[in-house]
Structure formats: C-alpha cells, structure tokens
Amino acid sequence: MTSTLTISDLTKRFGEVAALTGVSLTVAPGERVALLGHNGAGKSTLMKIILGLIPATGGKVTICDAAPGSTAARRAVAYLPENVAFHPALTGEEQVRHYLSLRGERPRLAMGLLEVVGLAHAARRRIGTYSKGMRQRVGLAQALIGHPRLLVLDEPTSGLDPVSRREFYVLLDDLAAQGASILLSSHALTEVEARTDRIVILSKGRVVAEGSLADLRRRADLPVTLHVTARNGYATDIAQSLPGAIMVDGALHLTCMQADKLQTLGRITDLGDKVADLDVLPPSLEDLYSHFSQGNAP
Amino acid sequence: MKRILSTASTEFRIALRNRWVTIALVLMAVFSLVLSLAGSAPTGGLGVDRLSVTVASLTSLSVYLIPLLALLISFDAIAGEAERGTLSLLLAYPIAREEVLIGKLAAHLAILALAVLLGHGLAAGVAIWSDQSAVEGLPALWRLSWSSILLGATFLGAGYALSSLSRRPSGAAGLAIGLWLGLVVLYDIALLAAIVADNGGWFTTEAFPVALIVNPADAFRLFNLTASGATAAAAGVGGAADAIPLWHSLSSILVWPVAALALAAAAFRKVTP
C-alpha cells in the first residue's frame, strides 16, 4: 500500500535560521506517528508545511499523491492547531456546523460529532464559557469531520485531564483501524508510549531518532533509577549493602544499566523487611531526548 | 457557494452576539431621527422640501459614521482569527482565501445595509409625515442609501486589508482609527489649508478636484451634494461640489469598493498563519 504522507529531504529556512534540515518521513495508512521535540525543534513548522500553510525551501512533500495546500490535499487532511480557541460568541454546535459546511458535509452531523468527543451536554452553550479542555474537544470534533485520510494534530491532548486523554487515544485507535494516518506532536512520553506505532524525535530541525519507544530505549541504553525507601533505622544498613546509593530526602537513590537491572532488584529483594518501598524509574523522555539530541544517534 | 454562505451566516451571528448589529442600527436610527427632526428649521429660506434638507445633513453625518462603523466591524476579521489560532485551521480547510473574504463581506455589508435602510427609512417617515412635499426628496434619499452602502463596502475592504497587515487585533484597531482620522478628518483639513496657502493658484484649480475624487469619503459627499443640488445647504469642502462633474465622483464611489476588496485580497494572500 502506498503511504499517505511522504516527506523527502525537506528543508525550511526563515532567513538565516534553518528551521528544518533534510527531514524525511513517511506515514502509512493506519499508522500512528508521534513527533517529539522541544519547543522550537520544528514540529509546528513541519506540520504547517504538510498542511500547505507555509512553503518549503527545499525537498518534496506529497499527501495522497497531491501537493500540500492543493484542494485535493486539503480535502484529505484534518488539522488541530496547538492552543486553538474558537470564537467565544458561537456555541460549540454552531462552530462545528460551520466546519461541516466548509468541508461540504451536512451540518446536521454536528451533534453526533460532539457526542463522540463527549461535549453533547454543552453543545448549545457559547464557547466563551468553555474550559480549555472543552475547547480542545471542539477542535477534536472538527478534526473528525469527513473521514480524513491524514490527521495532523499539534499537541492534541494539552488541556485534557487523564481520563479524557485516554478516551481521546481510543478515538485515534478507531480512526487508525479504519485506515487513517495520524501524525501528532506531544511533550508527554507516557501517553504516546502505548498509543503510537512510531516515534520521531526532532532536534533543531533534524530527525535525530526514529522507531518504536522500546526501540529507542534499547538503543539509547540509558541507566535506570531505583528509589529505595528504608524502614525506620535500617537506612545505613541498606546503604552499606547497595554500593553507589546516595541518600536523598530519606530515600536511597541508585542507578544501574538496563542489563544489570534484574540483578540489582534481586539484591534489594534479599534485604527483606528492611525495605519499606521500591520505585523503578525508566529513563524519561527528557533523558531520551537529550541523549539523542546531543549527537548520540545510533 | 455553500462555504461562502456558511461563512456569512456564521459572521452575521457573531456580529449579532457581539452587539455590532444593535450598535449600528441604534446609531443610524438615532442620528437619522435627530437630523430629520432638527432639519425643519432651515427649510423656509431655501425653498426646497424638507427631506432634501435632511438628506444634506445625513450626507455630512454619513461621511463620518459609515466609515467608522465599517472599520469597527471589520478590523478584527483576519487579525482576530490569527490571534485565536483559528486562521491556520481555516486555511487548512478546502476554502479559498477569497471565499473567506467574500463570506465575511456579505455578512458585514448586510449589517451596514440594514442600519442605513432603517435610519433612512425613519428619516423619510418623519419628513413625509410632517410635510407632504417631502416626497420630492425620496430620489435623493435613495441615492444616499446605495452610495452609503458602497462607501461602507470600501471601508470594510480597507478594514480587512489593515487586519491582514497587522495580524494582531490591537494593531489593526489602531490602524483602522488612523485610517479613519486620516481620510475622513485630517484629509479635508489639509486640503483646506493647502487652498488657503495656494491662494487660487494651480493647486486650487487643478489638484484640488482630483484630490477630492480620489478620497472615497470626499467623493461620496461630493456625489450626493452635486446630485441633490443641495450644495447651498452644505459648507466647507462640500461647497466645491458644483465645480466637478457628477460622473467623476460617481466613478470614484463605484470603483473604490472593488479596489479596496482587491487590496484586502492581496493583503490576505500574503498572510502566513
């Protein structure tokens, strides 16, 4: 099957500043790809080029065999901008009805879409009275219009509470199962972890790593952190049997490499009743990100 | 077409909720009533019907009020969308930028037209109710109505252009007020100052008529005063009306709305969200 989105050797310069350099990426039908990177890494710029909102300096982008910004491409792509705020004087239903008309769909479908994103109860209230999470749901509702082939979602879960985030990813799973490609950007590693097929890390406009999260973790091979809380009085005993552990706020912090993790855990288990609690912290997105963006790409 | 209609009805709804419709209707109604009631005083000496005098007063008022209303309604059109983040979303939809502008224009022009027709209708009602011969002034009033709507279209287009250029609502509001002050107030003062300094030379005979025609607000005043022959009731720059052929000012008020919209479309096309 041909890919929904193909980007090859894309370059974008704003005057002297290189926003994107040599970015290549493909997204297949039904694939969910997360674009990670800090602010200014080029995520939004990449999305705007895909949408045809700004022209590329070099390279080639095709969406369903059409050029970005062409009518065919715009029909195939749905977009959710970062921090979108709709006109406060309109109700959620009126806003979605308008977007339906713009896509040539029947405005009557608005209520159904708002139900899908859990906003039916507030559909007749003005958007000015909505919370940030509710506005985000309006944004999601409009992105679902007309079975798009590609969804470009810029920080789609910002402002959503954990329960809503989970519901949102269930929605994305359904869309992907129907063959829609999804390209989303996020700061939160934990939520993209289980919910995307592939992760692309952008740093200073370059793709520095690409693969599944487990893939990236394995490749980076960063140390795991263990937090051991001792029962009253046993802290020094434990510190003696775990060389390299340091005392922080009454808990012992210990790091070990992935390969030594089970062995270290075994030593902690052997301490028996002296241990009150244990937390295992895998490398965070911050750790992975700084690892890959500092030129440690495999 | 469906996209333009949906844009227009959404914009109209927004204007209704933002009270722009109410403000425009009330302003035009109040001013028209006041002018037509006060217009009874000077009729005796001039030998014209009561409505024609009211038309002359309404013309002077509209020169200030219509551009102001049009700019107030339009300055937020593009900059507001950019600030809310909906502009990038809108432009990702399969709708052309020109369609967006036409949709907004249709809604905003409908609001201005409603306000103008309500105000003028009230003025005509009052004049005819108190003086039967005022019916003779109806053609002049009708001319004032459609030229007011064209003047409104010109300044709506100018408002969209400024809104596109500044990208931020506060900046667009500042530019809009600046444009209004410049074209409607300061322009005439500058012309009068130049005429006084020139003392009947080249500027007064050659440049001045052209300067009046190229300014849409002055062309509008000139057209209505010339056409109704009400120059006697007008003063200041309007006094020059007799010297300039009617078709000059008419072409100006017909060409300006198209030119302003073309400017707006060109400015909007340059906006990168």
Image (cartoon, coloured by chain):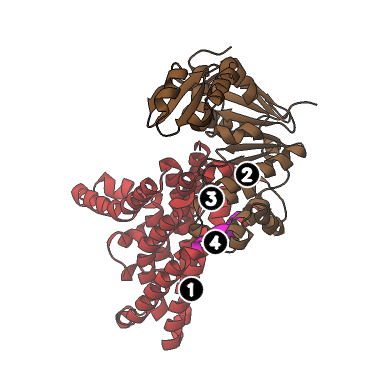
Chain colours: A brown, B red
**Disc 3 sits on a residue from what chain?**
A
- What residue sits 68% from the left and 41% below the top? A172
* Distance (Cα) linking label 4 and label 1: 17 Å
Residue toward you, B179 or A146: A146
Q: Could you tell which of marks 2 and 3 lies nearer the N-terminus? A: 3
- Residue A53 visible? The answer is no
Q: Is B65 displayed left or right of B15 in the figure?
A: left
Height in image: B245 above or below B132?
A: above
Q: Are marks 4 and 2 on the same chain?
A: no
Residue for badge 4 = B12
Height in image: B176 above or below A60?
A: below
Q: Is B176 displayed left or right of A227 in the figure?
A: left
* Distance (Cα) linking label 2 and label 1: 54 Å
Residue B118 is labelled as 1
* Distance (Cα) linking label 3 and label 4: 27 Å
* Callout 1 amino acid: Leu
Question: Is label 4 in a helix, a strand or a loop?
Answer: helix
Residue A204 position, x and y percent, is 48, 21
- What residue sits 41% from the left and 53% below the top? B216
Residue A166 is labelled as 2
Q: Are marks 2 and 3 on the same chain?
A: yes
* Chain part drawn in magenta: B7-15
Q: Nearer the viewer, mark 2 or mark 1?
A: 2
Q: Are marks 2 and 1 on the same chain?
A: no
Q: Could you tell which of marks 4 and 1 lies nearer the N-terminus? A: 4
Task: Check contact, mark 4 vs mark 1: CB within 8 A.
Answer: no
